[in-house]
Amino acid sequence: MKRIGVITSGGDAPGMNACLKTVVEMSHNYGYECLAFRRAYKGVIANDYFNITKADVAPIFNNGGSLIYSARCKEFFDPKYQEIGANNLKALGLRALVVIGGNGSYLGAECLANLGVNVICIPATIDNDVHSTTEAIGFDSAVNNATDMLDNIKQTMQANERISIIECMGRHGGNIALYSGMASQADIVAVPEDPLDKEHIYRFIRDQLNYGNASPTVVVAEKQYDVYALAKEIERDFGHECRAVILGYMQRGGRPTVKDRMLAIRYGVAAIELIDAGEQNLAIGLDNDLIVTTPINRAVKMQTNFRQDLYEAFKQLNNPRNKVK
Ligand code: F6P
């Protein structure tokens, strides 16, 4: 019997289930048995898998989260556990392991590839920080979730003439903050790709207030500031009310958008076609809306897919000094 394995790995992303369903259905259509490992690399180490059927995945397509659980696995940084995992997979005679996850999951996949396990990787992370693709599954859903929340926050801040500092997820990248900040017409976006110190943020807020905006919205990517402390300082220094909000996990849950569902289907179909064609150790991605592949050992070294062009456009649009008062 031909067999493949599948994991969903790292922080979950809306659309992971849709991709899992596609992989399971496609693998069965191609005559493969599909083994799903629970909790990603943890399940690979513990040999915790089950034979996943079309019936198992029938109801999950439009659900957030992951039927087979997603997890981060610190042990997998240890070569001892990598070897245990690789041996488990080899003993099962898998044609390939499909890894649905983000850049941390790709590093684990590269280790398995180096130990002789064939891996086919599908980008799924709300952060959109897998650099071998322009689009990861889950990013669009997270941006839509964040944008809805930013729209709501902006309305109440405008009514009360308050400054707001709103933190988005993104791990070490600013993609969610940039896209949702642009889509919700935030006034300032602070991303790690162009770190802004407190003086910069103060200058931007001062400009907005001077030019008649009594409720400037500052959207920041996580891990840069203590937004609660910053809001208190701003309130004190400007003598203007300021509130901080951390959007948190509400960005990561919920039903995948149509865009993410389509992406999940396209990547899932491509994965099984590649495996059946005998392809080895690839990261699947999108470039100019076309499916592309990159060798996994190259994919993990690629540097950034941050949309600098959009960031520049945002800054141009939102510079109050460009506006006639
Ligand atoms: O990678 C996805 C992500 O949601 C990041 O945006 C965030 O930094 C991180 O996961 C949170 O991780 P955890 O779920 O382990 O708290």
Image (cartoon, grey):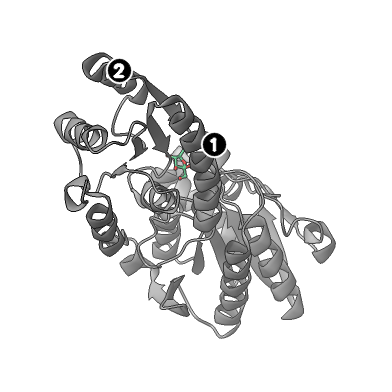
Amino acid type at image mark 2: Glu
Q: Which residue is at the front of the view, 2 or 231?
A: 231
Callout 2: SS = helix
Q: Is mark 1 within 8 Å of ligand 1?
A: yes
What residue is shown at x 59% (from left), y 46% (from top)? 70
* Residue at x 55% of width, y 80% of height: 274
Would residue 92 appear left or right of 165 to someone viewing this image?
Answer: right
Residue 92 in view (yes/no): no
Q: Which residue is at 25% across, 37% downward?
A: 208
Q: Residue 191 occupies which quadrant of the picture?
A: top left
What's the amino acid at mark 1?
Tyr
Given the current orientation, which residue lies at the most extreme top position? 236
Identify the residue under disc 1.
249
Left or right, residue 161 beside residue 18? left
- Residue at figure coordinates x 27%, y 60% from the top left: 313
- Vertically, is 257 above or below 156? below
Give the camera-side residue of 286 and 97: 286
> Which tag is nearer the camera, tag 1 or tag 2?
2
Residue wearing tag 2: 235
Outermost right residue? 55
Q: Quadrant of the C terminus?
A: top left
> Disc 1 vs disc 2: Cβ atoms closer than 8 Å?
no
